[in-house]
C-alpha cells in the first residue's frame, strides 16, 4: 500500500489526500472492510488522529484530521457552523450552466432508517462550469455526448449533497452509481479509463483553531482524473498541491478559552 500524501502537518492537525475508494473510518456500513484512512494515517505518522469531517468513500481529495480531542472539537464546530470554505471539481453529464445556486432540500440519509422517516433539510450548493466538451460518439440516445467540468462549493453539509444536487438539476456526476446514469459511467470506465466517481475535494480553507493563521489547502487530482483532464483538453484546470497560511488579525478559538 502506498503511503498517504500529506498536504500539511503541524503539532495540532494534519491534512492528507484521501484516495478514491478508501473509507475514512470504521462504521456500521463498513462490514468486511479492512482498510481505513484513519488507521492508515495513524500508523504512517505514529500519532492518534481524530476525524472532524467526512468525504464519501468514492470521493478523493483533501481531508483534515485533528491531533487532539480539543482541536477536533473546535474544528468540528467550524465545519458545522459553515466557517470552512470547500471547493470540489466534478465531471458531469451535459453542458452545465455557467453559474447556478442549487438549493433543493435533502433528506439526511444515514442508511439505517427509512427515507420517509427522515425530514428534508435545507441544502445549498453553488456551481460554476469551468469547461465543457462534446465527443463525437453516441453514448445515450443522442449522436454526440456532452460533458462539463464543474466547480462546486457546498454551503451546507448534507450527506452526498453535491452528488444529489447535481443529479437533481440534470447533470449527474460521472461514475456515480447511485445518482448517475450507468451508460455514461460505463463509457468513461471502458473507453476513457476512468472507472471511479469523478468528484474530488480540491480546496479547503479555515481559521486554524490554535495558531493565529488561516490555512488554505489545495490538493492535486489523482492519476485517473489527471489523465482524463489531459485527454479531454482540460489540463489548464488541473490544481496543484499548495499550502497558504496567512496570519489572522483576530485571536484563535483556543486562545480565547
Image (tube, rainbow, N blue to C red):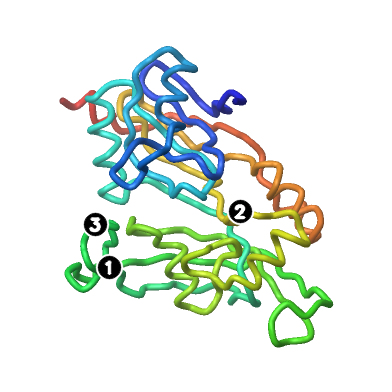
Q: Which residue is mark 3?
A: 112
Residue 131, percent across and down?
A: 70, 66
Q: CA distance from mark 3 to mark 2?
A: 25 Å
Q: Secondary structure at mark 3?
A: loop
Q: Which residue is mark 1?
A: 107
Residue 211 % position (x, y) = 35, 23
Residue 25 at x, y percent in the picture:
37, 36
- The answer to whether the residue labelled 3 contacts the one labelled 1, judged by CB atoms less than 8 Å apart, is no
> Residue at the location (29% across, 58% down)?
111
Secondary element at image label 2? loop
Give the alpha-carbon distance from disc 3 to disc 1, as whole Å. Answer: 13 Å
Nearest the eye: 28 or 249? 28
Q: Nearer the viewer, mark 3 or mark 1?
A: 3
Q: Nearer the viewer, residue 68 or 244?
A: 68
Task: Indicate the quadrant where residue 194 lies.
Answer: bottom right
**Eyeballing the image, is 11 above or below 116?**
above
Sequence-first disc among 2 and 1: 1
Q: At which x and y percent is residue 105?
A: 30, 73
Quarter holding the N terminus is: top right
Residues at marks 3 and 2 touching, judged by CB atoms closer than 8 Å: no
Taking the spot 63% from the left edge, 62% from the top edge, the residue there is: 91
Please name which of the two marks, 3 or 2, marks the residue nearer to the observer: 3
42 versus 27 height, above or below: above
Residue marked by disc 2: 196
Identity of the residue furthest to the front in this view: 32
Label 1: element kind: strand
Nearer the camera: disc 2 or disc 1: 2
Amino acid at each position: 500500500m502506498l503511503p498517504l500524501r500529506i498536504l500539511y502537518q503541524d503539532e495540532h492537525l494534519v491534512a492528507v489526500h484521501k484516495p478514491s475508494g478508501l473509507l475514512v473510518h470504521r462504521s456500521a456500513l463498513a462490514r468486511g472492510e479492512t482498510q481505513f484512512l484513519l488507521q492508515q494515517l495513524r500508523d504512517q505518522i505514529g500519532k492518534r488522529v481524530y476525524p472532524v469531517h467526512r468525504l464519501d468513500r468514492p470521493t478523493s481529495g483533501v481531508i483534515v484530521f485533528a491531533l487532539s480531542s480539543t482541536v477536533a472539537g473546535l474544528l468540528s464546530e467550524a465545519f458545522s457552523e459553515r466557517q470552512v470554505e470547500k471547493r470540489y471539481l466534478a465531471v458531469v453529464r451535459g453542458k452545465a450552466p455557467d453559474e447556478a445556486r442549487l438549493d433543493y432540500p435533502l433528506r439526511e440519509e444515514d442508511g439505517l432508517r427509512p427515507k420517509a422517516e427522515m425530514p428534508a433539510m435545507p441544502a445549498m450548493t453553488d456551481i460554476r462550469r469551468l469547461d465543457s466538451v462534446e465527443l463525437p460518439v453516441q453514448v445515450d440516445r443522442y449522436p454526440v455526448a456532452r460533458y462539463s467540468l464543474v466547480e462546486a462549493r457546498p454551503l451546507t453539509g448534507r450527506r452526498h449533497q453535491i452528488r444529489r444536487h447535481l443529479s437533481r438539476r440534470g447533470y449527474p456526476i460521472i461514475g456515480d452509481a447511485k445518482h448517475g446514469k450507468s451508460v455514461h459511467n460505463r463509457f468513461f470506465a471502458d473507453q476513457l479509463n476512468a472507472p471511479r466517481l469523478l468528484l474530488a475535494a480540491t480546496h479547503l480553507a479555515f481559521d486554524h483553531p490554535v495558531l493565529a493563521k488561516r490555512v488554505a489547502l489545495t490538493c492535486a487530482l489523482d492519476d485517473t482524473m489527471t489523465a482524463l483532464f489531459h485527454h479531454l483538453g482540460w489540463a489548464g484546470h488541473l490544481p496543484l498541491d499548495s499550502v497558504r497560511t496567512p496570519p489572522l488579525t483576530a485571536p484563535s478559538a483556543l486562545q480565547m478559552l
